[in-house]
Image: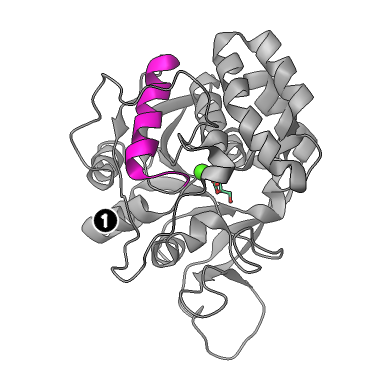
Amino acid sequence: QHKVIFDTDPGVDDAMALLFLDQHPDIDLVGITSVFGNASIDTTTRNALFLKQLWAIDAPVARGAGRAVHPDRVEGPPPTFVHGDNGLGNVAGVPDSVDIAPDPRPAAQFIIDLVRANPGEISIVAVGRMTNLALALALAPDIVGLVKQVVIMGGAFDVPGNLSPAAEANIIGDPEAADSVMTADWKVVAIGLDVTHKTVMTRAEMAEVARIGGPKAQFLSDVSQFYIDFYQHIIADGMFVHDSCAAVYVVAPELFTLRRGAIRVSCEGIAVGQTIQKPDGMFFPPGPWDGMPSQSVCVEIDAPAVMSLIKKTL
Ligand code: BDR
Ligand code: CA
């Protein structure tokens, strides 16, 4: 079994990835950490706790960062038009507060403790802002040698972004954090819009998943309707499953084609939040990639196989 910490901002596609991680027999979900992004940190933490309770997920939830690491970054209003005011597609039945408590530790400390207790074993699946990971790295640089891999949903490498022509949401939401995660000397696999825009769950497929999957899948389907409505302007009656791609990678890496090279994140100017990879073996004059570890960017995906694994697991 693969031990996984899920760092997330639920979030509709986050909820799908959470259910996938909990349901997949080869995954041992050892912790869930919340981060701001699709909604405020209060809301994403409440949602993580609520889904843990509703879906009877064993893993503890630790509350994470509520703002970007750099003091000058001011977060705009959350994208309620994508994930709803409650972060779960405005579905009814989400309580204002949940009567189970989060782990007492902040997410960064929780990550450090779990990683140190399981050296070489933990995959961190990070599908929100990279803030908790950056804080953990700053507090405990030794974890780079102890984490098995960091699988990220984030970035737009050879394609336009979704919050600007240059930037994808999880990266532009905390560019300094993303840059420190990408340039740390641990194994990063970045799965960005280059491939997640190829993974679509249609409304009809979601209805089928709900019909066969029982109450858990039914709730996920209810949550997803608002998100599918939002995506009507880009795709016909379906949703990108972004975050689930990072979860799938842990159990089925053979479905992803990777390109190696150092990754940097632009932290200022019109391209703020842009993810840039210098492919290994390409020559350039000295630049900000020099001396940075080679990481993996996903450039191709077997989308039909990924979607069928997601549907089967849900
Ligand atoms: C990413 O941003 C969020 O809206 C989604 O949950 C996903 O993690 C896609 O850009
Ligand atoms: Ca997310």
SS at badge 1: helix
Residues rendered magenta in the picture? 38-55
Pick the front one: 295 or 20 = 20
User: Does residue 299 appear in this view?
Assistant: no
Q: Quick check: 309 left or right of 295?
A: right
Name the image quarter holding residue 122: top left
Res. 142 visible in picture: yes
* Residue 243 pos. (x, y %): 57, 41
Secondary structure that dominates the magenta span: helix
The location of residue 204, given as percent across then percent down, is: 78, 23
The C terminus, quarter of image: top right
Q: Residue furthest bottom?
A: 285
**Count of labels shown?**
1
Quick one: which residue is furthest to the left in this view? 104
* Residue 159 among magenta residues: no
Position of 117 relative to 131 (above/below) = above
Viewer-proximal residue, 292 or 191? 191
In this picture, is 249 found above or below 49? Answer: below
What residue did someone put label 1 on? 142
What amino acid is at disc 1? Asp
Q: Residue at x 51, y 71 (%)?
A: 264
Q: Residues within 10 Å of mark 1 (few under 14, many from 20)?
A: some
x and y percentages locating residue 108 in the rendered image: 27, 47
The residue located at (48%, 36%) in the rendering is: 87
Looking at the image, residue 261 sits to the left or right of residue 100; the answer is right
Q: Depth check: give the residue in front, 113 or 312.
A: 312
Res 100 → quadrant: top left
Q: Quadrant of residue 239?
A: top right
Q: Residue at x 28, y 43 (%)?
A: 107
Which one is nearer the viewer's eye here, 252 or 227? 227
- Residue 154: x and y, percent? 55, 54
